[in-house]
Image (spheres, grey):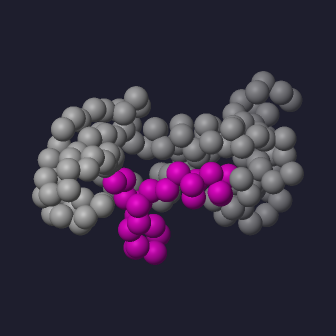
Amino acid sequence: MHCPFCRHPDTRVIDSRSTEDGAAIRRRRTCSKCGRRFTTQETVLLMVNKRSGVTEPFSREKVVAGVRRACQGRPVSEDSLAQLGQSVEEAIRARGAAEIAANEVGLAILGPLRELDEVAYLRFASVYRGFESLADFEAEIQQLKAEKGES
């Protein structure tokens, strides 16, 4: 680890602690050359395999941005979107895999989004599942009604 102040390549770890959620390790370091202290945070990278074959790091911000588009014009707060993003990330990390298919990220979004806002869920599902006709929407709406016990 290079010192961010003098760029010296030799630093020493003084203290290591796990973050509150356990997803990262915070390390307090000191530079052996300039003596200044700094903190680093280490997290495990979760990689997403996209349909195109490209692999990229998981981004909670991309999840929230996609859901935000589906929630446009709906009474959904930014806090709710942030909580959804966190719950999706926690669900994906709980699987314990270093890489996950983009399809599984979408599936992890659908459940919490259905609970958050049904209209936004239908919008997201229509794009994610590639609805091609009115019948696709009708089938999804009937499934939502059946789960709620409505006729």
**Outermost residue toward the top?**
149
Is residue 52 shown left or right of residue 142? Answer: left
Q: Position of residue 42 (x, y in %)?
A: 30, 47
Name the residue: 32% across, 45% down: 39
Q: Position of residue 21 (x, y in %)?
A: 41, 31
Q: Is residue 59 magenta?
A: yes
Image quarter (top left, top right, bottom left or bottom right) of the N terminus: bottom left
Q: Which residues are magenta?
A: 45-67
Is residue 83 shown left or right of residue 140? Answer: left
The image quadrant of residue 3 is: bottom left
Front residue (pair 63, 13): 13
Image quarter (top left, top right, bottom left or bottom right) of the C terminus: top right
Q: Position of residue 113 (x, y in %)?
A: 67, 41
Front residue (pair 130, 10): 10
- Is residue 57 among the parts visible in the rendering? yes
Front residue (pair 146, 88): 88
Name the residue: 15% across, 63% down: 9
The mark tally for this picture is 0
